[in-house]
Image (tube, helix red, strand yellow):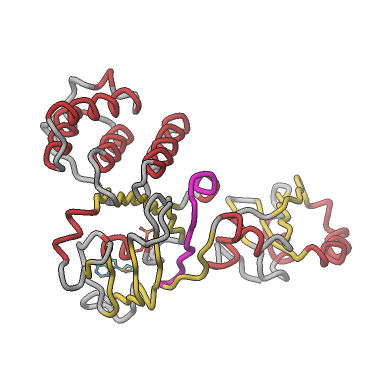
Amino acid sequence: MSNEPIILIDNISKKYKNSSTYANENISLSIKPGEVFGLLGANGAGKSTLVRQIAGFVQPTKGNIKLYNFDLTKEPHLANQFVALQPQNIWLPAQTKPKELLELTGRLRGLSIIRAKEEAENFIEEFKLTEHIEKKLQELSGGLKRLVAIAVTLIGDRPIVVLDEPTNDLDPSIRRVVWKRIKTTAQSGRTVILVTHNVIEAEHTLDRVSIINKGRVLATGTPMELKEKFEQLLRLEITARPNTENDLAKILARWNTTVKIGESSFFLTVPKNEIEKTFSYLLPYMEQFQDFRIITTNLEDIYFELSGGERIEG
Ligand SMILES: Nc1ncnc2c1ncn2[C@@H]1O[C@H](COP(=O)(O)OP(=O)(O)OP(=O)(O)O)[C@@H](O)[C@H]1O
């Protein structure tokens, strides 16, 4: 991996017209060639706004973004040369077949006819699209359309690939194929930026990650670095017996790290040196627990911890 950044984001802020708040505020990041860089954050945190600026679709209100040494605020059209973006809401030409679209995109990105054909065929095989090859894109399911959109983004040699929530619509087996492809894309020296909510999966794929909340970067590092930062914490996962959820929520609300997951489960994060105190407090209420586990923290906890999660009210 080269040490020179391919993307240099220098203190950018973005406020949309007709909006009173900043969608991005004072964000600075430096991303290298060959990195898989993740942006993690709740709905509305400002992740898509950030990647849309990297792709030159919208301009920062303040600050600037450099791709290589080109200043995108001065030459926004250059983004199109360097960046391939798969937006969250994909659009594909309805009447076209998957392989035609892939070949055409490859050609438009400067591949020779032979290479465009080869790459298109590789994607069709790898993404298990062979049996759908004769279908028009409008006939494909949502997940298959998403797969084609991912392949369209990756085909060719654009040095920066941005995937905005790529695996949301995909089933687990094909998701693994996509994550693997993302890894090999980065190993070939291209940079992949991934917007995701899928914290656990992302943990195995990302080289570095920024956690974004309310337009600001709260933390940046390797998943391991962020983990170490939080290794002094343990997570308690408690599932309530039927009809005791509300009582238990009140009890657990005493910890401001408690978040509710689903109907009856709660996660709370406590420092290791407070675990005994926590146990002695919880002991009288154990009968209300259907299930109880203690685990070391992972990136998901960090995400909840830093960005607030779905906190419960006391
Ligand atoms: N075109 C727009 N005009 C005005 N406000 C916008 C526009 N696009 C996004 N916003 C606002 O900017 C903020 C950040 O939105 P953004 O889509 O960047 O968040 P996100 O982290 O990608 O969210 P999600 O995970 O839900 O996709 C939100 O408050 C959103 O309502």
The residue positioned 42% from the left and 59% from the top of the image is 3
Q: Nearer the viewer, residue 281 or 83?
A: 83
Ligand 1 is found in the corner quadrant, namely bottom left
Q: Position of residue 235 (x, y in %)?
A: 71, 56
Q: Position of residue 13 (x, y in %)?
A: 32, 77
Q: Is residue 76 above or below residue 128?
A: below
Residue 45 magenta-highlighted:
no
Q: Nearer the viewer, residue 239 or 296?
A: 296
The residue positioned 49% from the left and 52% from the top of the image is 207
Quarter of the image where one finds residue 175: top left
Q: Position of residue 107 (x, y in %)?
A: 12, 37
Q: Position of residue 183 (x, y in %)?
A: 43, 41
Residue 212 magenta-highlighted:
yes
Range covered by the magenta-colored residues? 201-215
The residue positioned 85% from the left and 60% from the top of the image is 279
The residue positioned 73% from the left and 48% from the top of the image is 241
Q: Is residue 136 above or below residue 275?
A: above
Quarter of the image where one finds residue 272: bottom right
Q: Is residue 267 above or below residue 277?
A: above
